[in-house]
Image (tube, helix red, strand yellow):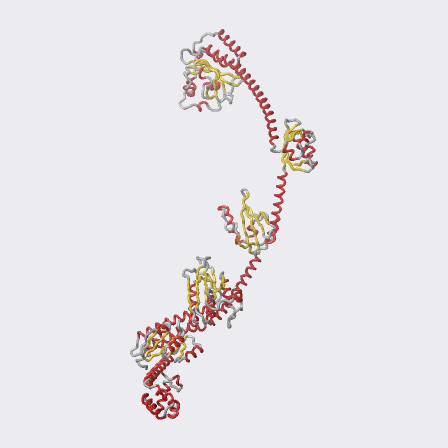
């Protein structure tokens, strides 16, 4: 059974389908909110809960795939389950590539939908967790001095202190001090820890792409 | 006394008397004359009177009756005297030509034959004495003073009673006696002589007057006739000439000279002879006419010919009369008949032509009289009915060419016509069955025209054997049916292909309600398995299922119509409804292709008569063409618009506009040609089939450029009549 603190959004222009699917989810214990069009959904104020979106492909005006793209562009990372009356392969491939959880062809079986919803909510919770870890690391990253930032980027590539000192034109001793401060500021217990953090923060050795 | 005449009363005297009149015996007292004292005869006086009378008779006979009356008055010493004469009209009345004494003012009066004493006297044929005869004869009451006594004596001419003489005493100052009777009798004889004399004098006068009158009339007639003939000749109303029996034309008027083209100088020089004017073959007829003239003075007009001066002939009608019977001179008239002859010839020619036209007509021409008898029968009638003209004429029409089962209605129709002047089959083209001589029946086209000539009706019928035409029509109908079937099949094929292009939309359309049904079914059973079951929610889910299932079945029905292979069915079609239905089929196509679909449907467009499925196919086809034309493009706007309007000419106009590629100029004239297509999957039958469908509905389908871009397809359909 799902968590009580999650919600399922649904956009479909056909009221019968919309009401039926919503009722089905309701009977399965999900909290559901429905919308008749993409625009209606975009403009809505949504609670900050673990959520997923059931989206009809054939919508008037902005269609399902368009909405998916627009949400991605505006940084809304909500797992999407597509419904379609006549899914064709190119369409479903496109949707899945863009991260859709499932592409269901109407009429679908109950379990297919419930599984998809479960999966979507699971992914969202996970995503949300990841997103909160990353933001903590980013906060820590912002406490580093520019020199420490440079040292971090070079350390996670596997360079030795001596090599780093050579790279930055300073002494091994100085690098050693910087490295100790980076470890402590980032809260990393080991080099492996630090490397994982750098991965999450997408830090690489190229100087131009370091986070500001 | 002359011999007595037979009594002349035609009817009983008594019967003619008014009721209550005194009987004859009560007023007659003749026998008293001999009982009365009588005076001695005065012969001298009597002689004097007779001499005077005879003198008057020879000198001035016209006054003899008056002198006689005065003589009676003088010799009998009575108060009034006179004569009564029977009228010349067979003696119906007496009139009084002469009266002397107190009754003198009554001269000229009289009584009917049997309503006075004169009649009694003639009946009894003797002298009679009356006393107060007005008691019996009320006719005489107004004649005053009244007669105390009246003595009457009849007189005769050649044995026939002609009248009476009488004397009247108005008072009893004196009574008639036997002496008076004697004198009156002798005066009666004189009256007879006088009457005869007067009558002969009158007769002579009448004879003289009659002769004079006849002479005057003859004179009058002679001068009148001459003048009339003169006027007639000079009036030049017709050709006239005077002639003599030897052959000379004495005088001729202008008109006659014009007819024969001779000059006036020819008449003057006596060159012109009517015998010479007459061609050889007419001489015998002329001799007959001359014999007629000699016998009766006139001759019956007859037609002949005259030579003109130039030797050509002119047809004339001539008539002649002698001026006097047995004479040698006469007058003749001549009428130029050239015009009439020409007209007759023309008429004959026209009649002949008409006959030959009727005979050579491709239609049978049959005429029937009011009794139903065949009066005309041309050559073609012989051909198609199998009766020759001579066989057919006189036969009963109905028994000759009308099949038995129609004869009664033919007769009642005829009766109806004579009663009302109206006939259901008259003056219009009708198709009926006719009968051949061999008993076979065949279809004919027929027009019957009633014609009134004088008082008689004739019915002319033009009859055409249409067996061939009927067969051809039947064939045409068959081939039309085949064509329609082929067209329907083709249309069906195109429809199925169009539907093929719509599979995605159709799947969506059907899957939509199906998914609602399944989802609601699932939730319904979930609500029921709750503990406790949530019945309200389960009921709501079930009702959604029903709603969705209904929707699905409607969709399937609509699709079935489009897929079904039907022969064309004509019904009243609401085009707006058809458009709306088509929209529901294609709106997923437009959504998928991000095409903005709009309709502008005129709310008041009337229904058209046609095949609903085929008309829907046309709209579907045009809309799908539009969608395909827009789909691949990036530009905006992507718009498809369907309109319905009523044109100025009252047609229903449907337009499908798109903002797609438009029609390339080089394709414009091939758009509707079969197998022309610009689509990779198309077979090029869509538009030709659309056009054939619209044209089969009596409409037009055409394409035009849409502004600023794209194409627009229009079709116009005639609006169904309001009664349908």
Judge whether B680 appears above or below B267 on screen: below
Count of number-bearing discs: 0
Relative to A96, B412 lies left or right? right
Q: Residue B383, image x and y in percent?
A: 61, 53
Hey, which quadrant is residue B220 in on the image? Answer: top right
User: In the picture, which quadrant includes the C terminus of chain B?
Assistant: bottom left
Decide if residue B613 is in sight here. no
Q: Work out whether B19 lies above or below B691.
A: above
Q: Residue furthest top?
A: B44
User: Relative to the observer, which residue lies in front, A53 or B603?
Assistant: A53
Give the quadrant of residue B300. top right
Q: Determine the residue located farthest toward the left in the rendered image.
A: B532
In x, y percent, where is residue B541? 34, 74
Q: Is residue A158 left or right of residue B361?
A: left
Q: Residue B500 at what x, y percent from top left?
A: 47, 72
Q: Where residue B604 appears, x then y in whole percent?
A: 41, 60
**Along the line of sight, which residue is nearer the eye, B390 or A78?**
A78
User: From this viewpoint, is residue B610 visible?
Assistant: yes
Left or right relative to A83: residue B86: right
The residue lying at 40 percent from left, 23 percent from top is: B20
In this rendered view, identify the residue nearer to me: A114 or B291: A114
């Amino acid at each position: 059974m799902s968590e009580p603190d999650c919600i399922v959004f649904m956009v479909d222009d056909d009221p019968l389908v919309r009401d039926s699917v919503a009722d089905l989810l309701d009977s399965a214990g999900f909290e559901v909110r429905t919308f008749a069009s993409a625009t209606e959904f975009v403009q809505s104020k949504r609670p900050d809960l673990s959520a997923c979106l059931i989206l009809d492909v054939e919508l008037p005006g902005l269609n399902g795939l368009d909405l998916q793209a627009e949400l991605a562009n505006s940084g809304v990372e909500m797992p999407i389950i597509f419904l379609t009356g006549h899914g064709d392969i190119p369409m479903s491939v496109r949707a899945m590539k863009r991260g859709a959880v499932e592409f269901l062809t109407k009429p679908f079986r109950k379990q297919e939908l419930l599984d998809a919803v479960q999966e979507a909510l699971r992914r969202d919770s996970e995503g949300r967790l990841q997103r909160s870890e990353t933001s903590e690391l980013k906060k820590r990253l912002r406490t580093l001095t520019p020199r420490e930032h440079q040292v971090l980027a070079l350390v996670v590539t596997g360079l030795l202190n001596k090599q780093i000192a050579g790279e930055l034109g300073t002494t091994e001793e100085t690098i050693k001090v910087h490295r100790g401060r980076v470890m402590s500021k980032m809260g990393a217990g080991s080099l492996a820890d630090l490397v994982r953090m750098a991965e999450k923060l997408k830090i690489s050795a190229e100087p131009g792409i370091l986070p500001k | 006394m002359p011999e007595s005449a037979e009594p002349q009363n035609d009817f009983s005297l008594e019967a003619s008397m008014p009721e209550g009149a005194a009987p004859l015996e009560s007023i007659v007292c003749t026998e008293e004359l001999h009982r009365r004292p009588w005076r001695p005869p005065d012969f001298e006086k009597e002689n004097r009177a007779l001499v005077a009378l005879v003198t008057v008779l020879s000198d001035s006979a016209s006054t003899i009756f008056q002198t006689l009356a005065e003589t009676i008055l003088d010799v009998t010493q009575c108060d009034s005297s006179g004569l009564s004469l029977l009228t010349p009209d067979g003696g119906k009345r007496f009139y009084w030509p002469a009266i002397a004494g107190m009754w003198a003012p009554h001269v000229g009066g009289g009584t009917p034959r049997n309503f006075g004493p004169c009649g009694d006297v003639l009946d009894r044929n003797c002298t009679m004495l009356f006393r107060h005869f007005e008691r019996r004869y009320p006719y005489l009451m107004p004649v005053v003073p009244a007669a105390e006594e009246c003595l009457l004596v009849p007189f005769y001419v050649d044995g026939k009673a002609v009248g009476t003489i009488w004397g009247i005493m108005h008072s009893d100052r004196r009574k008639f006696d036997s002496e008076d009777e004697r004198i009156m009798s002798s005066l009666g004889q004189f009256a007879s002589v006088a009457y005869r004399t007067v009558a002969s004098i009158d007769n002579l006068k009448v004879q003289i007057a009659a002769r004079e009158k006849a002479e005057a009339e003859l004179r009058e007639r002679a001068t009148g006739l001459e003048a009339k003939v003169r006027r007639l000749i000079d009036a030049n109303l017709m050709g006239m000439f005077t002639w003599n029996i030897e052959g000379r034309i004495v005088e001729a008027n202008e008109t006659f000279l014009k007819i024969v083209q001779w000059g006036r100088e020819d008449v003057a020089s006596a060159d012109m002879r009517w015998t010479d004017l007459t061609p050889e073959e007419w001489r015998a007829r002329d001799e007959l006419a001359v014999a007629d003239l000699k016998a009766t003075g006139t001759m019956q007009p007859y037609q002949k010919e005259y030579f003109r001066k130039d030797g050509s002939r002119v047809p004339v009608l001539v008539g002649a009369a002698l001026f006097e019977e047995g004479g040698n001179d006469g007058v003749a008239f001549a009428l130029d008949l050239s015009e009439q002859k020409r007209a007759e010839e023309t008429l004959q020619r026209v009649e002949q032509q008409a006959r030959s036209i009727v005979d050579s007509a491709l239609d049978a021409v049959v005429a029937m009289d009011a009794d139903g008898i065949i009066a005309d029968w041309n050559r073609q009638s012989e051909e198609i009915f199998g009766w020759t003209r001579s066989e057919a004429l006189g036969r009963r029409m109905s028994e000759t060419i009308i099949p038995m089962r129609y004869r009664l209605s033919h007769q009642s129709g005829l009766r109806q016509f004579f009663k009302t002047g109206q006939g259901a089959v008259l003056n219009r083209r009708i198709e009926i069955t006719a009968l051949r001589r061999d008993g076979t029946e065949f279809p004919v086209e027929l027009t019957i025209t009633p014609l009134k000539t004088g008082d008689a009706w004739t019915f002319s019928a033009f009859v055409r054997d249409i067996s061939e035409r009927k067969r051809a029509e039947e064939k045409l109908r068959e081939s039309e049916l085949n064509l329609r079937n082929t067209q329907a099949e083709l249309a069906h094929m195109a429809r199925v292909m169009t539907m093929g292009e719509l599979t995605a939309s159709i799947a969506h359309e059907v899957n939509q309600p199906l998914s609602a049904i399944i989802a609601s079914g699932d939730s319904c059973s979930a609500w029921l398995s709750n503990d406790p079951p949530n019945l309200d929610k389960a009921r709501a889910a079930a009702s959604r299922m029903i709603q969705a299932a209904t929707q699905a079945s409607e969709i399937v029905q609509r699709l079935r119509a489009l897929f079904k292979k039907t022969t064309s069915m004509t019904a009243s079609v609401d085009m707006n409804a058809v458009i709306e239905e088509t929209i529901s089929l294609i709106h997923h196509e437009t959504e998928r292709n991000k095409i903005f679909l709009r309709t502008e449907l005129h709310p008041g467009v009337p229904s058209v008569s046609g095949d609903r499925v085929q008309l829907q196919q046309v709209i579907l086809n045009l809309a799908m063409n539009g969608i395909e034309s827009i789909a691949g493009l990036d530009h905006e706007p992507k718009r498809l618009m369907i309109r319905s309007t009523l044109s100025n000419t009252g047609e229903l106009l449907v337009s499908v506009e798109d903002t797609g590629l438009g029609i390339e100029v080089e394709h414009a004239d091939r758009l509707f040609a079969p197998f022309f297509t610009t689509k990779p999957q198309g077979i090029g039958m869509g538009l030709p089939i659309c056009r054939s469908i619209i044209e089969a509905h009596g409409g037009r389908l055409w394409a035009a450029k849409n502004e600023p871009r794209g194409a627009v397809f229009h079709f116009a359909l005639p609006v169904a009549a309001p009664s349908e």
